[in-house]
Amino acid sequence: MKSEQHRHFAALARAVAERADRQAFTELFDHFAPRIKSYLQGLSLEGGQAEEVTQEVMVVLWHKAALFDPAKSSLGTWLFRVARNRRIDLVRRDKSGLLDPEDPIFRPEEADPADQMMDAEQRDGRVREALRDLPAEQLELVRKAFYLGLSHSQIAEETGLPLGTVKSRIRLAFARLRKALDQDDMVDTDF
């Protein structure tokens, strides 16, 4: 019985390949499409994906039926191999499955406690105030080094100042900032 069915399906595939026989294709589609979809769902494809891959497999049958060789396998074996390969291709293309939604990187960071946020805001305010008290030439070099990310050599080249002057002005600026911030810390602890 099975070999008779295999021969029948092979004859229908040959009719599709040779004459684009729609009736033969419809019979093959009606027989194999539900089985292929079920097979794909068993391989953990959800309904929509399984339906889509099944359609692709049947399109392969319509366009490439001439590639089917009944001497090598049954039509069912050939179609299920195409389905398996299409599923593998789908999994390879689907990068979303590589992401674990429970990965800590996808969780928002916890907010700092209110007292730490207030301390940080106060510290930022003190730094801004201390920066305003710097001489203009030191402030400009600090801005270029730390806000623009320029190296000391790049600053020297851009400003035309000798490298030693750039380094000494930045060092002086830090000394002034440190002194101003240390004084603020002493004032804060006096309360």
Image (cartoon, rainbow, N blue to C red):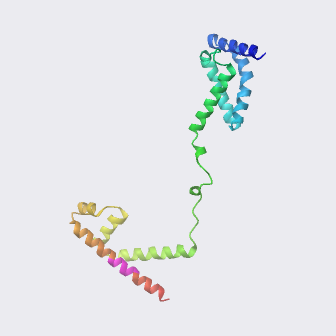
Q: Is residue 52 above or below residue 173?
A: above
Q: Can residue 41 be found in the magenta stretch?
A: no
Q: How many discs appear?
A: 0
Taking the image as shown, residue 166 lies to the left or right of residue 52, namely left
Is 178 contained in the magenta span?
yes
Quadrant occupied by the N terminus: top right
User: Residue 118 or 101: which is nearer the viewer?
Assistant: 101
Q: Residue furthest bottom?
A: 190
Residue 162 pos. (x, y %) = 20, 66
Q: Main secondary structure of the magenta part?
A: helix
Q: Which residues make up the magenta segment?
A: 175-181
Q: Is residue 86 above or below residue 160?
A: above
Q: Nearer the viewer, residue 72 or 175?
A: 72
Where 90 falls versus 188 (above or below)?
above
Residue at image position (74%, 15%) is 3
Query: Which of the 4 image quarters holds residue 59?
Result: top right
Q: Residue at the spot x=40%, y=74% of the render?
A: 128
Residue 48 appears in the picture as rendered: yes
Determine the residue positioned at 37% across, 78% down: 178
